[in-house]
Image (spheres, helix red, strand yellow):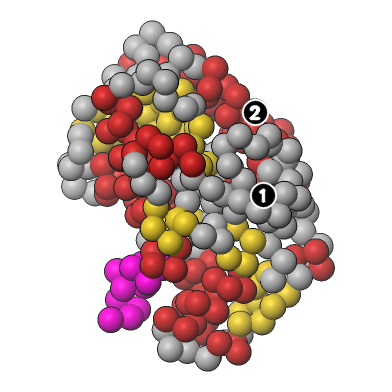
Amino acid sequence: MKILITGSTGLLGQALVTRLAPYGEVAGLSRHEVLMPGESAHVVCDLTDAEATRRAIRAVAPDVVVHTQALSDVDRCEQEPEEAQRLNVHTVDHLCRALETSQPLLLALSTDYVFDGRKGRPYDEEDAPNPLSTYGRTKVAGERLARRYAKGYVIRPSTLFGTGRVNFCETVVQRVQRGEPVEAFADQTTSPTYTADLAEGIEALITAMGTSLRNRPRLYHMTNAGSATRVDFAKRVAAWLNQDGSLIRAVAMRDQHLSAPRPAYSALASRHLAHVIGRTLRPWDDALHAYLRAQHWIN
């Protein structure tokens, strides 16, 4: 099986390359040349270029495409809406058109920011999107394009942490180990998600899809179980590290004068995933502990 991963140098992309390499013949795709781990191939392609996208798909001839590439800087999307449209919508359109002839399975990654946060309890796959930001709106548009493709499916994760790119979790670790304070939002609740677990869930979904596509839902929420504010998460990191929890200082997201609005509550419930693969991902606190151990920050 040939698997193409777009955005293969990103936080999730790197986890997918590692997880899926034993599963099949993996190729990573990104805009710049990089050295891939192991025997995985790499394709340089600008997905905003429709013809270049068609050439890349013909060259790789994938059976599965996992599309993780996106402009995920929420504030930059708000400041540069045309660039957000190009990178989050046009790329999906070009990809879907390039796949029409060969019809591989497409799994397109989206976000919890498609919701407005007013529900106050975990969103499931039946809840209608109502994005607050340019980022959220472009991701909804990308979702619609992916689901319009005959074999296109959408996966929505939430706040990611993992190996390969600096992220909030790593920042907390570094600062508390130096005895430095960490500011964290007390008024934003999400479902923290370990990229290694997300990659494992995507692998399980690919396996299930390989058995049959009949009656499969087209949309999947995929996060570690449970929810937490940024303060909750940061304090848990400090606790696992046996560091001073008072270093975590609660601040209000609404007071930060951010360019883009964020949902105050965007925890997700993974109902469709449980139905198709028979389980959900483990609780986020267990996943956090596993990540900290994998990084040798704790024993």
Q: Is residue 263 above or below residue 96?
A: below
In the image, what residue occupies the spot 49% across and 41% down?
A: 271
Q: List the residue tagged with mark 1.
A: 74
Q: In the drawing, does residue 152 fall left or right of residue 18?
A: right
Q: Is residue 272 left or right of residue 125?
A: left
Give the position of the C terminus as an image quadrant: bottom left
Quick check: 27 left or right of 29? left
Segment colored magenta = 288-299
User: Which residue is denoted by mark 2 in the rendering?
Assistant: 141
Q: Give the x, y percent position of residue 126.
A: 61, 34
Is the Cβ of the residue at disc 2 closer than 8 Å to that at disc 1? no
**Residue type, numbered disc 1:** Val
**Vertically, is 74 above or below 46?**
below
Residue 292 drawn at (x, y percent): 36, 72
Q: Residue 8: image x %, image y %?
A: 38, 43
Location of residue 141 by image quarter: top right
Residue drawn at (46%, 37%) of the image? 272
